[in-house]
Image: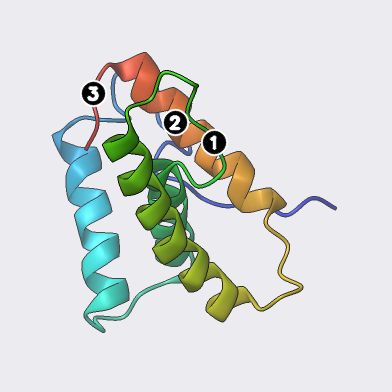
Amino acid sequence: MTETYRSLSTGKAQGQRRDAEALNELQGAYERLFFGRGHTPEDQQMVLADLASFTGFFFSQDQNTPAETLREANAMRRVFARIIRLGLGADGDLSALYRAAVAETLATKEEGKTL
């Protein structure tokens, strides 16, 4: 059985994945997770999927990417990798998180805006 991660886009129709309600949902997940207000496993999954998508952790830049952009992207990836490495351990399965990050990245492109 393949594990799935809940992402912000899970169960939302196009047009609702990046609206004000989605932003409130994402902010609530971050608040509960990082500020100790009763987070759920779904909050953890949503935040990790958002961070994976935002940092481009599973994706690469092309050869025309400016050096400053590459440095910033590498720094974000390193921070995210630390969270994953310490949270999941060396043997952690990233396949479900990868699929959630892809879904979030596609939703951002399709909706034409980020949160």
The reply to whether callout 1 and callout 3 are in contact (CB within 8 Å) is no
Q: Position of residue 111 (x, y in %)?
A: 31, 18
Badge 1 is on which residue? Answer: 59
Asked whether 8 or 76 is in front, the reply is 76
Residue nearest the viewer, comparing 14 with 114 = 114
Q: Is residue 99 above or below residue 44?
A: above
| Residue at x 49%, y 21% (from the top left corner) | 63
Q: In front: mark 2 or mark 1?
A: 1
Badge count: 3
Q: Which residue is mark 3?
A: 113
> Residue, x 71% and y 69% (percent of image)?
92
- Quadrant in which residue 99 is drawn: top right
Q: Nearer the viewer, mark 1 or mark 3?
A: 1
Residue 80 shown left or right of residue 95 in the figure:
left
How crowded pointer 2 is (Cα within 10 Å; few <14, some 14-19, many 20+) is rated as many
Which residue position is annotated with label 2?
A: 105
Residue at point 79%, 50% (across, down): 2
Q: Secondary structure at mark 3?
A: loop
From mark 2 to mark 1, how far is it between C-alphas?
Answer: 10 Å
Query: Please, what is the three-letter code of the amino acid marked with disc 1?
Result: Phe
Q: Quadrant of residue 16?
A: top left
Give x and y (percent) for residue 10: 48, 39
Instruction: Give the residue displayed 27% in from the left and 51% down from the top.
Output: 26
Q: Residues within 10 Å of mark 1 (few under 14, many from 20)?
A: some
**Please, what is the three-letter code of the amino acid marked with disc 3?**
Lys
Q: Earlier in the sequence, mark 3 or mark 2?
A: 2
Q: Secondary structure at mark 2?
A: helix
Most foreground residue, 39 or 75: 75
> The disc labelled 2 sits on which kind of residue?
Thr
Disc 2 + disc 1, Cβ < 8 Å: yes
- Identify the secondary structure beneath mark 1: loop
